[in-house]
Image (cartoon, helix red, strand yellow):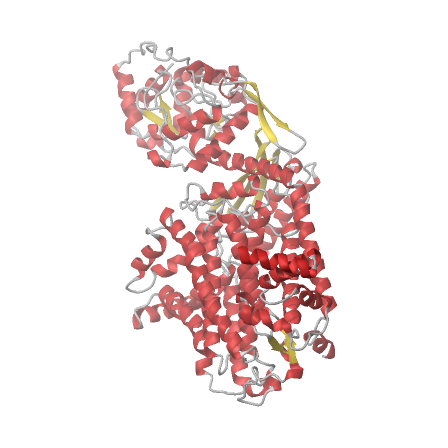
Amino acid sequence: MSILKKIVTYRPSFTVRILTGLISMLILLSVCTFIGLADQTRLNVRANEFNARSIEVGAKVYFDQCARCHGVNGEGVEGLGPALASEHFVGRIELVRDNMQMQTIRVVQPSERLKQIGWQGTLRDYIIAVTEAGIPIKTSNMWDVTHPTFSERLGGPLRGDQIRNVADYIINYGLDPLPNDQALLPPAPGEGMAPRPTPIPLTPAQEAGREVYLAKGCSACHAIRGVGAQGAIGPNLSRMGAVAEERIASESYKNNLKDQPPATTGAEYIRQSILYPNAYIVAQCPQGPCQANLMPQNYEQQMTPEELNNLVDYLNALR
Amino acid sequence: MAIVGQKLVKQIQTTGLKATVAQRLDDAFTRFTAGLSWNDVRGILRGDPPAKPNPRVKPHTEGFWFHIRPTFYHEAVTTLYPTFRLGLLSALFFTFEIITGIFLMIFYTPSPTYAYGNMIDILTNVPFGKFMRDLHRLGAEAMVIVVTLHMVRTFVTGSYKKPRQFTWFTGVVLLGVTLFLSFSGYLLPWDQLAFWAVTIGTSMADAVPGIGPQLNLLLRGAPDIGAGGLLRFYLFHVVLFPLIGVIFVAVHYYKVVRFGISLPPEMEAVGEDTARKVPPEKRVNFLPDILTNELMYAGVAFAVLAVSCATWYSAPLEHHADPLVTPNHTVAPWYFYWLQGLLKIPHMIPFLPTSIAVEVDRFFANVFGLTPKVFWGVIVGPLMFAILFVVPYIDPNPSRRYGDRKIMLSLGALFAVAIIYLSLAGIPTGVPITGFGYVGGDPASEVGQAFIPDEGIGPVRRLPYEQYVVGKFAINAEPNTGSAGLDRLIRDIHNDMEARKVRPDPLGKTLSADATGSLEVKQIQADLRQVIITIDYTDVNGAPTQFKKYTFLHAQSGYAD
């Protein structure tokens, strides 16, 4: 108790007051000096950290908003959107740091795409401009869609900071871009409007199959070019007939098929995929690896045998 | 001009040039110090006793700044007890906040488009920017604590009693100003923490019966917080509340000087106030004793703040505000936890089955026509604060002695305990042991929140990028990923899951015994990985369920430091 009393009744002497005050001021000054001396380096380090965090946030935005048309790995999706991770688009960059930790992006190889379309600004400007405002007119028959506006100001879902984050994310592809032959490149300006090859004329049964496709809600998840089907959950079916034949010949199909006899023709494969979706799960879907149990397993009850035949016939005709 | 010149020449002729210059400089010095010559100041600094008549009272009568201060204090109030210098520290922190605040104002635009970017600029492009922001934030937290302690001290020593009732009243206003200054500053960084804490806070206004929507509109400028709300909060923060603060500090301090600092209760007879009747031998002169004492306190306080900000303290900055994404476990600022706890009261009464709690809510709704939010948040909460205003006017006991004030001191203690209890109940984890006030989703999502919190860092982000190994790993007690850090993380997740399997949370929920988890690390880009925690479990309805939570981690994001 007496110690407590001593503490609370303590009255520092004049010397103690002056000394304590002086020492405190010295500490304050040394802290400021200490911070001031290395401040520039610390600012640079922190700028790098915030750039890294911006890329992290951009990745989330990309997966939520962009991956559907540009691919999970930025490789592009047929009929929907070109590659963003391709060397053609992002070029190739390096990060250079000076001895003050100041990081700058050095362009090793500039974007060919920007040169192609004659864009005067930086890649970042281009990404932001297109993401914000979209591309209002169709410039190529390669795509079924035009680029929508993503900026909040123009009716889109994203704020300015999110668009800048996603630009940082896409630019970061440049550190290790996809080789052009592994990516879906857009056509050069002026070349994309070439008329499409005349579609194979459909038989009346196949026409009926297309109506089944649209009526039974397949288009909610599966895109087919040219029929207004833009679903991006399951695989794109625009070339289903050709894909089915490639698929039954593949090792992966032979090894991973479950509970069903292997299909011998493309049409059988398509029928199997509709009726028993879990028999074989395709590796890549628009939003990442395809998942079991996602596709309903009751189409046999939902369709008459004739409707099913027509649907299979129609899908098989898509090449 | 000619006359001045003649006088100067005459002085130089009679006393010499050197003496004339010295005398003229000393005159200027004396005018600057409002009455103290160089020798007087030197004497003060050397600790010499004052001459008679004491020249050191001159600045108190001649100058503005010192006339605000008394010329002497009673010896008994110059020790640590009874004041603990908390009033002085409150004023110091207020000044300190103004200085650091003006610095930050230079780099800030109160608009949702720019505010968050300005924060990043302050941290990455403004010399001393982070230091100033940390100082401002830590100073604000310290100010709330110091002002509150100042009030507690005044209550305990009974210094609110006659004649200081109104001093206390203005002090409670200043406590409110401090809280609202801090709260209004909360919104300005425009990050998730700011946005949701303030959304919760201002939703209280919306609940006020009758005028709620109008009040809410007045506060936020729109039904939800946006550009209008940010500008208003900015103006509250830099104009309105500081202005009210300055006015009330002036009144408050005038009263303090007018009535003197109250002596320790045991030194006075009951009902007497002798603070202003200081016998000459008990006087401690303001110059130099009190002034040096205060400068010492200022120096120590600022040095402690500066060292803290240079070492352990860093003001938080979360993700950009997003009105569409509510982070898990959003809370109000800590000094409003008690209000948040108050809102949970009907569900917090010990050992009360939930159905009865619902009945309690219904009772208030039917009998008073008030929803629980209105009753507890809008009526009881502000009333608790309002009680503070009237304390000196309802306390009939004239004695300031501790022994005579058992009832009032007990009530005060009870109030303090209630505030602490409610504050604990206000945070998502609830009161320790009893778990009252606990808020949590299902146990699997709580595992996710514990390791990858929606906001803030958490163990997954704290593990450095290099320590992750690309691949998919089962979560078990003996992970073997080839990285010690990742093994430790997986073990921690495993232990957390096992604990949630056997120990129900305060709502009685456990993680199903068959729950299994996995942690997957994917390389997304150069220097960028995705970490995904997946938990497969059986939900309360017996259905197999999967919980998934992920985060992205960049090699340079610097969460680890």
Q: Position of residue B473 (x, y in %)?
A: 62, 38
Res. A222 in view: yes
Q: Nearer the viewer, residue B369 or A283?
A: B369
- A1 vs B242: above or below: below
Q: Quadrant of the C terminus of chain B?
A: top right
Q: Position of residue B213 (x, y in %)?
A: 30, 58
Q: Position of residue B559 (x, y in %)?
A: 61, 43
Res. B413 in view: no
Q: Nearer the viewer, residue B15 or A9?
A: B15
Q: Position of residue B418 (x, y in %)?
A: 51, 72
Q: Nearer the viewer, residue B301 or A148?
A: B301
- B386 vs A244: above or below: below
Q: How many numbered marks does the figure carry?
A: 0
Residue beneath the point at 43% across and 17% down: A243
Residue A132: quarter of image = top left
- A134 vs A240: above or below: below
Q: Is residue B325 left or right of residue B460?
A: left
Residue beneath the point at 55% across and 35% down: A51
Residue beneath the point at 41% across and 14% down: A187
Residue A173: quarter of image = top right
